Image (cartoon, rainbow, N blue to C red):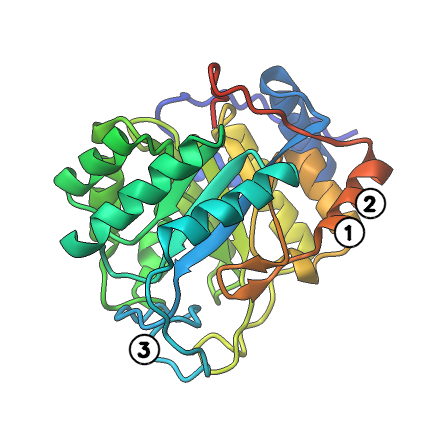
């Protein structure tokens, strides 16, 4: 019988080789290890539900090769103005009543302009008043903007690194890898929790996926949330014909994220419409314990809530409850 090697690397720093050894374990050994770590830190039959709303769609000046909202790509998506505060809060209330405990607001900006911050601050305050965790993804932030959002009550800020530093230049040219890390530092310094992950299936090699997780695990503090997105190829983008990642390879990345960042919520994010129930079940076993609910993720499709509820019933999974006085770790 093949036994997992005795790998107990430092929790504050990982080498690429240490992470690769874990990633390349026999599949059953990797899953056993990931599930063991998961049970040490979380209820294995609870999954946190988040809802994502695009508060400002399209017209983004960045050239991210996967994104339908970039002005550089011809996807047929029309740019829209920033949504009204009242409408965002109404949408959040609907999400809360449907069981979501975290509400994420996304805007297709390179970075928010000063004239937009008052409205965003009002949205954060309004959603927070509903008793939900708040999250925003607005592009790059400077120190002042991060402090503004913290003072408004923002719990999480999402800013993905997307891929490894080595592969990054093949995906984006308008913003550097270092730019992303700088925004993460501003968010962390302000006292906002960090939501940061990446996208797989963008033509990267396995070592790039591993290196992406090494970067995240070696941050001064682990991100409280780590979204792992499976690329949704969108017609009109440079990655429209990208070869999909193999399902087993995807599960390996979920498991590796769980082992390397044991107290973080690992979110099964974009791409779930292309995943079978069996693949999602494997991901939950490997340590994923957060999903987005609702029929859209910004501009992409997402499984409807009835399908998610049916899968949860079959697996014996229940939504994670949120206590606003005692916030979960991620």
Q: The residue tagged with tag 1: helix, strand or loop? A: helix
- Indicate the quadrant containing the N terminus: top left, top right, bottom left or bottom right: top right
Q: Return the x and y of residue 280 as percentages of the image width and height.
A: 72, 47
Picture quadrant where residue 182 is located: top left
The residue that disc 3 covers is 71
Picture quadrant where residue 319 is located: top right
Residue 282 horizontal side relative to residue 170, left or right: right
Name, please, the residue furthest toward the right: 314
The residue that disc 2 covers is 310
Crowding near pointer 3: few (<14 within 10 Å), some, many (20+)?
A: some
Of residues 322 and 67, the one drawn nearer to the viewer in this rendering = 322
Name, please, the residue furthest toward the front: 86
Residue drawn where x is 41% and y is 49% of the image: 86
Of residues 4 and 295, the one drawn nearer to the viewer in this rendering = 295
Crowding near pointer 2: few (<14 within 10 Å), some, many (20+)?
A: few
Q: Return the x and y of residue 111 as percentages of the image width and height.
A: 22, 56
- How far apart are the two marked residues, 2 and 3, measured between alpha carbons? 38 Å
Residue drawn where x is 39% and y is 53% of the image: 106
Residue 108 in view in this figure: yes
Residue 236 horizontal side relative to residue 110, left or right: right
The answer to whether marks 3 and 1 mark residues whose Cβ atoms lie closer than 8 Å is no
Q: The residue tagged with tag 2: helix, strand or loop? A: helix
Q: Return the x and y of residue 192 as percentages of the image width and height.
A: 31, 30
């Amino acid at each position: 019988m093949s036994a997992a090697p005795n790998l107990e690397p430092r929790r504050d720093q990982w080498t690429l080789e240490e992470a690769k050894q874990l990633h390349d374990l026999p599949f059953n050994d990797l899953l056993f290890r990931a599930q063991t770590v998961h049970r040490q830190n979380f209820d294995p039959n609870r999954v946190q539900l988040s809802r994502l709303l695009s508060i400002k769609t399209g017209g983004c000046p960045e050239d991210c090769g996967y994104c339908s909202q970039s002005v550089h790509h011809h996807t047929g998506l029309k740019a829209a103005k920033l949504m009204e505060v009242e409408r965002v809060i109404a949408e959040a209330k609907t999400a809360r009543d449907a069981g979501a405990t975290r509400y994420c607001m996304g805007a297709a900006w390179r970075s928010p302009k000063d004239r937009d911050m008052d409205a965003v601050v009002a949205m954060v305050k309004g959603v927070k008043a509903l008793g939900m965790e708040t999250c925003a993804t607005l592009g790059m932030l400077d120190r002042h903007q991060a402090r503004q959002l913290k003072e408004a009550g923002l719990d999480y800020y999402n800013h993905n690194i997307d891929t490894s530093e080595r592969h990054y230049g093949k995906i984006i040219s308008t913003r550097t890898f270092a730019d992303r890390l700088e925004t993460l530092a501003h968010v962390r310094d302000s006292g906002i929790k960090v939501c940061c992950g990446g996208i797989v299936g963008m033509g990267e090699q396995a070592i790039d996926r591993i290196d992406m997780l090494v970067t995240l695990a070696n941050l001064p503090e682990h991100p409280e949330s780590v979204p792992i997105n499976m690329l949704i190829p969108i017609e009109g983008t440079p990655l429209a014909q990208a070869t999909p990642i193999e399902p087993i390879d995807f599960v390996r990345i979920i498991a590796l994220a769980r082992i390397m960042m044991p107290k973080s919520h690992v979110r099964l994010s974009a791409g779930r419409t292309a995943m079978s129930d069996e693949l999602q079940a494997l991901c939950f076993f490997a340590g994923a314990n957060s999903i987005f609910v609702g029929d859209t993720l910004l501009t992409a499709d997402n499984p409807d809530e009835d399908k998610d509820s049916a899968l949860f019933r079959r697996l014996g999974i229940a939504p994670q409850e949120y206590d606003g006085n005692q916030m979960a770790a991620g």
